[in-house]
Image (cartoon, rainbow, N blue to C red):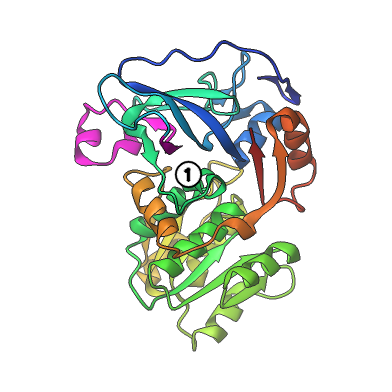
Amino acid sequence: MLHAPRDLRLEQAPIPVAGPDDVLVRITTNGLCGSDIHFYKEGKLGPFVVDRPYIPGHECAGVVVQAAASGGPTVGTRVAIEPGIPCRRCALCKSGRYNLCADVVFMSAPPVNGTFAEYAAVPADFAHVLPDSVDDESGAFVEPLAVGVQAVTRSGLTAASTVAVIGAGPIGLVTMLVAKAYGAAKVFLVDGLPARLALADQLGADATINFREENPGARILELTDGLGAGFVFDASGSVAGSASAPGLAARGGSVTFIGWPELATFPFPVETILEKELDVHGTNRYANAFPKAIALLAAGKLDVHPLVSHRFTLDEVVEAFRFAADNPAETVKVMIKA
């Protein structure tokens, strides 16, 4: 239970009551998201504020222990929980863009409880079945993978394209993996942390660029015979990273923003977008992306295990949050197992 900034406590709470359309899931594995760390350190993120105790967490896999009366996954089925629950009735939901539903209830966005617990109740249609070939740790990665799937889908990525990803954190790295699985010919990663760039190399980046040591725009022009990257993804979560994205793109290319920068408003190179006639896309979580992420994992199209830098148990959850908050340069993805 997160009570206030840096005040996370391991407490006893009642098992959630599952409604007739819900499944009760025993959580086996949780990934620690950057948003969880924001709430832990700052007590807020965007419009969401920690003003009462709540359970964080939304990247998880588990086992159904109580099925829904209305159908869905049966008892004993392994599932990944999709944490953004829409109304299912509005025009956006009916059009398939349910992530934009004005009434989305997102697990772990305070005060809504999340999944750092032994049990969670979730609508049966948002508990996605995991095949036997997808282990629990990969199952907990389905949520961040879905972010990458959403971004690549929104971008209109075409096969044999050249891609640049700004930010080699977990979301940037999974976006690289998804882009490659979707047929990108070359993917370049831009970051300022050597350890994360080394991991990007290990995961199959065609080139890594340390922006502290060289100019990413110049280097990408060199790598692309002067053209630039056809598809640019900003997963940096920084003003500087976001503002640099159009400069890395090829003329007629695409720029897709995933990370939320520190400031809501900042100087931005609109002239570059106009002059290059770039397509610019925003992404907000995901819609219809979980089945695709699971399919990629099940088919062996990508491997997320190298992204796990640290592992803790649920009994060690307080230490896990503290470690991740205090050692951002040393952590990529922290996994917490029941």
Image side of residue 24 versus residue 327, left or right: left
Was residue 292 drawn as part of the magenta stretch in this picture? Answer: no
Residue occupying the point 29% across, 25% down: 87
Q: Which amino acid does label 1 sit on?
A: Glu
Q: Can residue 150 be seen in this view?
A: no
Residue placed most toward the observer, 189 or 1: 1
Residue occupying the point 53% across, 21% down: 113
Residue occupying the point 50% across, 20% down: 112
Q: Quadrant of residue 151?
A: bottom left
Which residue bears the numbered disc 1? 143
Extreme-bottom residue of the structure: 225
Taking 161 as reference, is 240 above or below it?
A: above
- Residue 114, percent across and down? 53, 26
- Total marks drawn? 1
Q: Quadrant of residue 57?
A: top right
Helix, strand or loop at label 1? It is helix
Specify the segment rendered in magenta: 77-101
Residue placed most toward the observer, 231 or 287: 287
Taking 308 as reference, is 199 above or below it?
A: below
